[in-house]
Image (tube, rainbow, N blue to C red):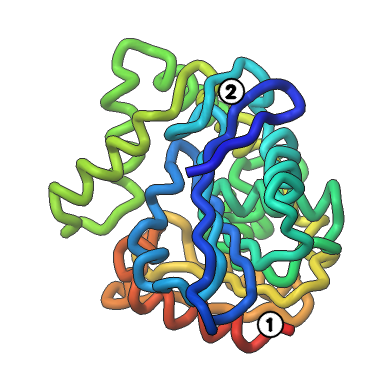
Amino acid sequence: MGEFVTRDGCTIRYQDTEAAPGRSDETIVLLSGWSQTAAMYDRLVKVLDGRYRTVVYDYRNHGRSGASDNGARIASLATDLRELLDHLAITRAHLAGNSMGCSVLYSFVDLYGTERVKSLVLIDQPSVCALVPWLTQEDAGEVGAIMDFAGAAGFVEGLLGPDAEAVRRNFLRSMVLDDISEEDFAYLLEQNMTLRMPYGARLVLDHVMQDWRDVLPRIDVPTLVTGGELSHVDATSQRWIAGQIPGAQLEVFTRAEGGDHFPFFENPEHFAAVYTRFIDSVAT
């Protein structure tokens, strides 16, 4: 593990695994979702087995990274990512994000462009989560926006209330396959519970209120969009995203392929095969 201190004094901890001798000189950086940690990618990193230089890290107030009252905003996490790249002297990288990690990547592109991005992989996240007033009913169905303002407020209140642990457990349960082992679920929940409150509640509200649709057509690097047949995120929203990004590829995983919100955890072998095929096809 390594660490660095952000512009506002928060310690970010990361794991930087060099590629094995004679393997690819490409660098990948993996971003997790809200309340999850770098450990979510342990299985994938193991399957990749030194094929690329691989960087995983915990967001501020997540996992093993430091605590901070600052930066409960997606834009702040995008700036943390830029500072991580600077700290590790990574000029350009293949960036992959799951769930909220997609929002961080959208914000990164919005703020800094794609000069430091070789490719993007966007794993199972709508471009708009909340039913913002300017969405028509037809648009809401296409982009996968399913949470109204009252629902968002209720979730945040639950995260801060006396039943917060049950709220977080139920939220995680909604994102995994019904037949997940109790051991795996307990592990994911343990990672989830490292997110500190009230920071986490403030961050998720900022996350779900974003509308990234205007960023999509500006993504000018090779992009792979993935969804899951059994995910709580309707795969229609992923098809829509792929249609907005010039030249984007789409992969919708079946149940057997790990087709829930965390395909790299459920079936890391299949995800690694899809991911490496994509990276190797665009690497220069």
Give the image location of residue 89, x and y in percent.
74, 54
- Nearer to us in this view, 251 or 24: 24
Q: CA distance from mark 1 to mark 2?
A: 37 Å
- Nearer to us in this view, 121 or 232: 121
- Nearer to us in this view, 62 or 89: 89
The residue sitting at the front extreme is 21
Q: Tell me: 57 left or right of 273.
A: right
| Residue in the picture at 26% in, 58% down | 177
Q: Quadrant of residue 202?
A: top right
Observer-side mark, 1 or 2, equals: 1
User: In this picture, is 147 found above or below 61?
Assistant: below
| Residue in the picture at 66% in, 59% down | 138
* Residue type of the residue flagged with mark 2: Arg
Q: Are marks 1 and 2 in contact (CB under 8 Å)?
A: no
Residue receiving disc 2: 202
Q: Quadrant of the C terminus?
A: bottom right
- Nearer to us in this view, 197 or 62: 62
User: In this picture, is 229 found above or below 204?
Assistant: below
Q: Quadrant of residue 144?
A: bottom right
| Residue in the picture at 36% in, 57% down | 42
Give the image location of residue 238, x and y in percent.
57, 67
Answer few, some or many: residues within 10 Å of disc 1's Cα (few below 14, many 20 plus, some between 14 and 19).
some
Give the image location of residue 80, x and y in percent.
69, 38
Q: Earlier in the sequence, mark 1 or mark 2?
A: 2
* Residue type of the residue flagged with mark 1: Ala
Residue receiving disc 1: 283
| Residue 171 in sight in this render | yes
| Residue 148 in sight in this render | no
SS at badge 1: loop
| Residue in the picture at 36% in, 36% down | 192
Q: Tell me: 222 left or right of 130.
A: right
SS at badge 2: helix
